[in-house]
Image: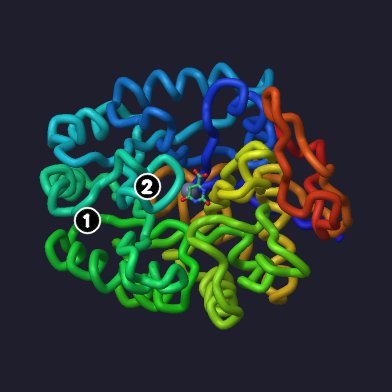
Amino acid sequence: MNFSMIRPDDWHLHLRDGAALSAVLAHTAQRFGRAVVMPNLKPPITTVAAAGAYRDRILAARPIGSRFEPLMTLYLTEGMNAEEIGRAKACGFVHGVKYYPAGATTNSDAGVTGLERAYEALEALEAHDLPLLVHGESTDPAVDVFDRESIFIDRVLIPVRERFPLLRIVFEHVTTREAVDFVRSAGPRVAATITPQHLLLNRNALFQGGIRPHYYCLPVLKREQHRTALVEAAISGSPQFFLGTDSAPHARHTKETTCGCAGIYSAHAGIELYAEAFDRAGALSQLEGFASMHGADFYRLPRNTDLITLARESWSPPQSYSFGEHELVPFRAGEMIAWKLLEDTTR
Ligand code: DOR
Ligand code: ZN
């Protein structure tokens, strides 16, 4: 069976830089029209000038003939001033500012220790109507790792909503029923992205027959009841939920080690995995809204106009892709994926 839909966009993506960028970009560009590119490089992208230079490097790394469009973000820092946010709005290529609680995840050391230290920037975001993108996990070491998202809602998101009621917020990669409920109750200025792994797996996957570093990402996979809540939200047709793969490539040796990096690489099957999740839920007809409409509408960008076609046809990703001098282990390496992108529909 074939299924055609408006070309999707990826509203949360890590592309890295240099040889890693060159290794992964084609996977995204083959499937998605645009992607919101995360700024957690080393050093992080904290200025419009740096975002412009990074954007140029991404454009230069595109496959020949590709029209893929990177949507850039800034990395929120303490003391980021209103002028920088004004420049971000004016430049036209920055579409949001990403808040990483300091220490929450990969390259978040330069993030924000207390959000009140970034209030000038939040005020400017609200005034310019530029979205704040949030990694929503408490970094309090006393908080259980599986509760970090729900505690963050109570301690940070609810107060921020009260203080900045007009601020538009994307709660990135939601993983819990509590997050879904919060987004629903917050109304149309708040939206959420959902990853393929959080729709397809629960936390048992991390320990299936032994420890599985390639299923480790942040926020970490949760219980089955949370996965079910995420599937319900994704297939609900609500414009508050949309696609964000959070594809986050790390070299194999940095994941298969004593203290492995967080991140799952899914760009090689970035739409196919969602097709599988929606199909399993009997809701393939809801995929186009989630993948190709709701995100564009929230970010106030035009929807794509061209189509892609997927086939219900199994295929198997390789055990690894080359990743500069290293190897990258993709999601479902050597296993089956139930949906396939038809090559002749790539742009
Ligand atoms: O698993 C993750 N990987 N979560 C994040 O928040 C960051 C990302 C990365 O950059 O590797
Ligand atoms: Zn991410």
Residue drawn 11% across the image and 44% down it = 120
Name the residue carrying label 1.
Answer: 167
Q: How is the image coloured?
A: rainbow
Residue 284 visible at all: no
Position in image of residue 332 (x %, y %): 77, 54
Q: Is residue 93 above or below residue 213?
A: above
| Placement of the N terminus among the 4 image quadrants | bottom right
- Amino acid carrying mark 2 in the image: Arg
**177 lies left or right of 87:** right
Name the foreground residue: 56 vs 209: 209
Camera-side residue: 105 or 98?
Answer: 105
Q: Nearer the viewer, mark 1 or mark 2?
A: 1
Q: Is mark 1 within 8 Å of ligand 2?
A: no
Residue 291, quarter of picture: bottom right
Residue pictured at 77% horizontal, 57% vertical: 3
Indicate the quadrant where residue 83 lies: top left
Residue ID at (43%, 50%): 105
Which residue is rendered at x = 34% and y = 42% of the image? 109
Q: CA distance from mark 1 to mark 2?
A: 14 Å
Q: Is residue 214 visible?
A: yes
Mark sitting earlier along the chain (1/2): 1
Furthest toward the front, the residue is: 258
Determine which of the numbered discs, if any, sits on residue 300 in the image.
2
Q: In the picture, which quadrant includes the C terminus?
A: top right
Numbered disc 1: secondary structure: loop
The label shown at residue 309 is: none
- Percent coordinates x, y for residue 114 in the rendering: 19, 53
User: Eyeballing the image, is 31 above or below 210?
Assistant: above
The type of residue carrying mark 1 is Leu
Seen from the viewer's position, the closer of residues 134 and 291 is 134
